[in-house]
């Protein structure tokens, strides 16, 4: 049976065996698919396995900082330590190596080049300098879907 993850106020509610856990999705480093579960890797070396689809997560995460690495992973570009454009992989802050498609490498580079409108580019502080943004959050929808 598929799990339900709720998203509200920059938080996600994860169902676990003992109940529920809430985490800010600004702390989400990456998501990897390990049949039949998605493994959500958070800062401070915590990870949770949930039974949801990658597409469901991607539809509910802000597209200004989260992109598909390939068909079996999602990455938070704020936590990317190294991007190897020729070998098509990204190394995340928690030392996980994520394979990337060519299309998503180009999208990654485009997002990083357009990141200066967010000040500072930090997933924890959530501030943005977009004057038309009503909630002044990095994860607002003022940046729109790409």
Image (cartoon, rainbow, N blue to C red):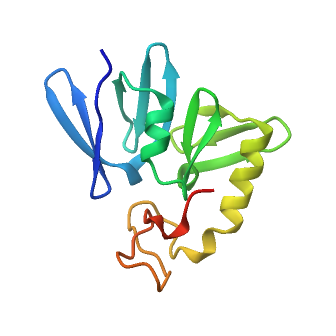
Q: Is residue 88 left or right of residue 145?
A: right
Vertical placement of residue 58 versus 145, above or below: above
> Is the N terminus in the top left, top right, bottom left or bottom right quadrant?
top left
Lateral position of residue 114 relative to residue 64, left or right: right
Which residue is situated farthest in the right direction here? 86
- Which quadrant of the figure has residue 47? top left
Residue appearing at x 44%, y 60% in the figure = 123
Q: Tag count in the figure? A: 0
**Residue 11: % across, % down:** 29, 51
When asked about the image quadrant of residue 87, the answer is top right
Percent position of residue 7, x then y: 30, 47
Q: Is residue 41 above or below residue 106?
A: above
At which x and y percent is residue 98?
63, 33
Q: Nearer the viewer, residue 111 or 92?
A: 111
Residue occupying the point 54% across, 54% down = 63
Question: Residue at left 49%, top 31%?
Answer: 54
The x, y position of residue 124, in whole percent, is: 39, 61
The residue at the point 44 percent across, 35 percent down is 56
Q: Determine the residue located farthest toward the bottom in the rendered image.
A: 131
In this view, 119 is above or below 61 = below
Q: For the C terminus, give its image quadrant.
A: bottom right
Q: Quadrant of residue 133?
A: bottom left
């Amino acid at each position: 049976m598929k799990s339900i993850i709720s998203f509200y106020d920059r938080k996600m509610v994860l169902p676990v065996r003992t109940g529920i856990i809430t985490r800010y999705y600004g702390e989400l480093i990456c998501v990897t698919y390990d049949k039949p579960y998605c493994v959500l890797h958070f800062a401070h070396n915590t990870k949770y396995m949930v039974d949801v689809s990658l597409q469901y997560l991607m539809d509910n995460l802000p597209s200004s900082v989260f992109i598909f690495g390939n068909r079996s992973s999602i990455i938070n570009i704020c936590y990317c330590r190294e991007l190897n454009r020729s070998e098509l992989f990204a190394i995340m802050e928690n030392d996980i190596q994520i394979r990337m498609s060519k299309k998503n490498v180009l999208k990654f580079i485009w997002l990083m080049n357009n990141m200066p409108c967010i000040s500072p580019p930090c997933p924890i502080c959530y501030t943005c300098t977009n004057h038309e943004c009503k909630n002044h959050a990095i994860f607002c929808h003022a940046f729109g879907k790409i």
